[in-house]
Amino acid sequence: MAMAMSTRLIPSPSEKGLLASCKTLRHVKQIHAQILRSKMDNSNLLLLKLVLCCCTLPSPSPSALDYALSLFSHIPNPPTRFSNQLLRQFSRGPTPENTLSLYLHLRRNGFPLDRFSFPPLLKAVSKLSALNLGLEIHGLASKFGFFHADPFIQSALIAMYAACGRIMDARFLFDKMSHRDVVTWNIMIDGYSQNAHYDHVLKLYEEMKTSGTEPDAIILCTVLSACAHAGNLSYGKAIHQFIKDNGFRVGSHIQTSLVNMYANCGAMHLAREVYDQLPSKHMVVSTAMLSGYAKLGMVQDARFIFDRMVEKDLVCWSAMISGYAESYQPLEALQLFNEMQRRRIVPDQITMLSVISACANVGALVQAKWIHTYADKNGFGRTLPINNALIDMYAKCGNLVKAREVFENMPRKNVISWSSMINAFAMHGDADSAIALFHRMKEQNIEPNGVTFIGVLYACSHAGLVEEGQKFFSSMINEHRISPQREHYGCMVDLYCRANHLRKAMELIETMPFPPNVIIWGSLMSACQNHGEIELGEFAATRLLELEPDHDGALVVLSNIYAKEKRWDDVGLVRKLMKHKGVSKEKACSRIEVNNEVHVFMMADRYHKQSDEIYKKLDAVVSQLKLVGYTPSTSGILVDLEEEEKKEVVLWHSEKLALCYGLIGERKESCIRIVKNLRICEDCHSFMKLVSKVHRIEIVMRDRTRFHHFNGGICSCRDYW
């Protein structure tokens, strides 16, 4: 817009219109420059109009509001009504700190304040959580006699104290009010919600109803949000019924609150009922639905919602990626992240943590390195949670060197960092390094927590260090005053079980202050299978099945225990029970990453496009290994088959197929990395050792519980797993 300004001392009607039509800060500055050139800079009225013009621009930027404050500071004796108007504009805008700057300017220069000055000031204090200034303004309002006479100031003070985390002070003022309208109740209820006192939200809502005040839609949304956070489904249902019975107009805010409440309480069928009735499914309510499904592991339902959303923001993408990552579908999480990249949606820290977790579960090192580089390039590389997650990721991808490199290069470490690195050593069977790092941590005065001790005890368990494990368990209680949780007792039971101290394990189970869970009985049961303790194994399996009748692992181990004793009738009964219950054994699968692509193999898999080459390579490798003494071990094949059939079956295990694909593929690394979802069997373990020696190649294999590093015919576990 061209600014052809007149030099008349009094602005004409057209010039007043010009002021009103300003669209940008540049226009305001042009008018200000014309005023200065016209020697009208002493016109308070014009300057005040310019100030208000800055504040009422279509999208007032922080720089426009700063300019307004600068202009105002040059006006001598501004009328109070103008300063109040400016306070209101500042408190509503993106720079509430300007409200407080203006307040300090008014106080320094002795300009008067009236009762209309205080609500915007307190609103700005609330936004900034500037408690000390809030206390000063409260004192000033009391000194001027405004506090007791003005309910707007009282309500603003309640909101200010709640926003500053002083919820008891807010409630004290609330209780002193002689008259409370629905706005005041809403402020106090919302204050409790902001401070996560969700039970108090519900109690105060009941008090409000008793007082005869009718709730509005805003209060109902706040109460539903409190129900969602507290997981109080019954109260949430009652609020929903109240809304129906009282004919409330169910707008988008209430609809979203209802869906969010039901979803957070895990009642997805009720959330879906509300959702399906919506005439238009906007992004916020759809995100609430897919987040609810994702948290419950119902990722197919979540993806159904996700795919039908017209608009998707970062929260929505992150929720879906997190759902896949937490539901042990890491490949899907990474595929969705790649799609997100193609659409140029910039992730935040929450998204990155989910992606790093997914990559850790896949165990794909090339992708892990790419994600690490991506995190560094996009400004996440120096954040503490991301670095902690990277340690875990590299450890689970089989690269302990990179995990340690991240740890040592961290500018700042907390107890989670140390615990993550200790756990990394533990899962790789490097108990000596785990214990050494624990002592180094103590030397640096970092106090270990319960998670740290889980890592140390886990390391002792997988290395057979029974005495050391007992000492750490005692020091946790006596030296560090940490009460052992079920997980710590579980580690100790596992320590005794692996070392074949089964009676000690049983004694600990009987004396610990918690009832044993599925994991503890499972450790004992598996150890009994491995060490041939039939009666105790049956007992442990029975106890486990009492807790979880459809537990596939317990039924399979029970069947295996009977099979080892060739009690085929009992095996048949267990299998028949599994069939009747619809329980099937978890299928073994192995993953290998070749040329930045993850390949998945099942037992006796023929689906891979290069399966003919893979089986040809397998035959060749078996022939080579037989020359150095390899004989397939069938002890792990617990089905009623002829011996030759068992030998065929054991050679078709998924990890052997993955290994042979790694041997025929063009690899960028000399190391072959395999991830298996179940425990490696005895035959595959021997097979991997011999292949590493004959082919002079390092093989890193992650099974359900730990890592095995095969090199030169030796495994890092020292055959103790």
Image: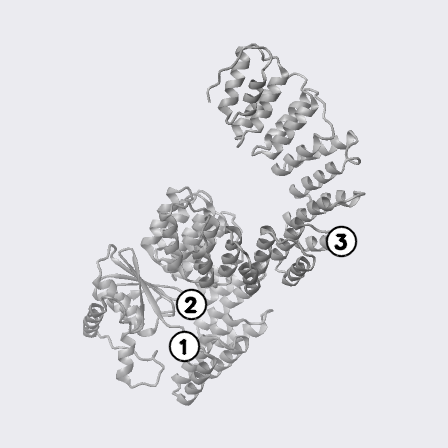
Q: Using residue 356 as the reference point, say whether residue 442 is left or right of it.
A: right
Instruction: Determine whether label 2 and label 3 are within 8 Å by CB.
Output: no
Which structural element holds mark 2?
Answer: loop
**Label 1 belongs to which residue?**
530
Q: Is residue 184 visible?
A: yes
**Label 2 belongs to which residue?**
464
Image depth: mark 2 or mark 3 in front: 3
Residue at the spot 54% in from the left edge and 21% down from the top edge: 18
- 360 or 6: which is nearer to us? 6
Which structural element holds mark 1?
Answer: helix
Q: Can residue 435 be seen in this view?
A: no
> In the figure, 302 relative to 409: above or below?
below
- 606 or 496: which is nearer to us? 606
* C-alpha gap between disc 2 and disc 3: 61 Å
First in sequence: mark 3 or mark 1? 3
Q: Which amino acid does label 1 sit on?
A: Asn
Give x and y (percent) for residue 80: 70, 23
**Label 3 belongs to which residue?**
207
Q: What residue type is labelled 2?
A: Gly
Judge the density around disc 1: few (<14), some (14-19), many (≥20) Cα neighbours within 10 Å: some
Q: What residue type is labelled 3?
A: Glu
First in sequence: mark 2 or mark 1? 2
* C-alpha gap between disc 3 and disc 1: 62 Å
Which structural element holds mark 3?
Answer: helix
Residue at the spot 45% in from the left edge and 81% down from the top edge: 578
